[in-house]
Image (spheres, grey):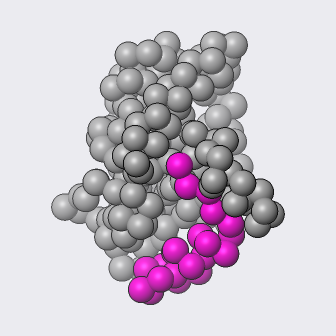
């Protein structure tokens, strides 16, 4: 059942991006998105100048992940839909990011020989096929003492969470968790220190 939900979510993801980007001019969109990511790093008090010289993983990058902010850095961008983005979205082309290493893979299935100092998984963890395996992979791919940054939409209202889980209103997000659910997931077995 989980695999079917995930495949439906992936199909809907492509549809969503097509509709969303249809009204956007490519250059303007990517400039705004780059500014957004730089602002995001600043709010997290992560120094762009220091980070750009480290190995960086953008896990679940989508067509406009944080990789676009690191032009020229040693960054790897991983997503199971990369080929679909390039085929179906006029905005996305790997050639526009020649220094980024793109890898078609799910977050939970990607393991690198060389670990990353900074791992970002931004608005992705609730899209994966196997959330526990994805968290484990994020940790496994990060150096000891490295930083894993995860952001996610979550439910603050327990009743709404239960309704969404039961009825499946949000097919794009196979996992419907509360902040407490995520904290428990991220800290189980000492996976992450929050």
Q: Residue furthest bottom?
A: 190
Quarter the C terminus occupies = bottom right
In-image side of 122 versus 28 (left or right): left
Q: Residue furthest left?
A: 113
**Whether residue 193 is situated above or below residue 127 in the rendered picture:** below
Q: Is residue 168 visible?
A: yes
Residue 44 or 170: which is nearer the viewer? 170
Magenta-drawn segment = 174-194
Residue 113 or 4: which is nearer the viewer? 4
In-image side of 41 versus 159 (left or right): left
| Residue 178 x, y percent position in the rendering | 68, 66
Q: Residue at (30%, 44%) from the top-left corner? A: 105
Q: Is residue 25 magenta?
A: no
Q: Residue at (53%, 49%) from the top-left corner? A: 174
User: Tag count in the figure?
Assistant: 0
Q: Is residue 96 visible?
A: no
Residue 157: quadrant of the picture = bottom right
Residue 59 or 144: which is nearer the viewer? 59
| Residue 20 x, y percent position in the rendering | 65, 22
**Whether residue 87 is situated above or below residue 118 in the rendered picture:** above
| Residue 35 x, y percent position in the rendering | 68, 39
| Residue 61 x, y percent position in the rendering | 46, 42
Q: Residue at (33%, 26%) from the top-left corner? A: 83
In-image side of 189 versus 110 (left or right): right
Q: Residue at (34%, 57%) from the top-left corner? A: 108
Residue 131: quadrant of the picture = bottom left
In-image side of 113 versus 78 (left or right): left
Residue 140 or 10: which is nearer the viewer? 10
């Amino acid at each position: 059942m989980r695999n079917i939900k995930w495949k439906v979510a992936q199909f809907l993801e492509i549809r969503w991006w097509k509709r969303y980007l249809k009204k956007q001019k490519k250059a303007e969109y990517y400039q705004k998105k780059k500014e957004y990511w730089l602002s995001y790093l600043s709010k997290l008090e992560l120094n762009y100048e220091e980070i750009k010289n480290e190995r960086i993983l953008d896990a679940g990058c989508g067509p406009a992940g944080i990789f676009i902010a690191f032009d020229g850095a040693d960054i790897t961008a991983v997503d199971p839909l990369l080929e679909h983005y390039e085929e179906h979205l006029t905005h996305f082309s790997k050639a526009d990011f020649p220094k980024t290493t793109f890898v078609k893979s799910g977050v939970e299935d990607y393991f690198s020989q060389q670990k990353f100092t900074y791992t970002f998984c931004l608005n992705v963890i609730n899209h994966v096929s196997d959330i526990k395996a994805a968290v484990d992979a994020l940790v496994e791919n990060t150096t000891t003492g490295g930083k894993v940054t995860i952001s996610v939409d979550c439910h603050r209202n327990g009743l709404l969470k239960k309704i969404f889980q039961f009825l499946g209103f949000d097919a794009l997000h196979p996992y419907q968790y509360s902040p407490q659910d995520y904290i428990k997931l991220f800290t189980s077995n000492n996976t992450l220190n929050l």
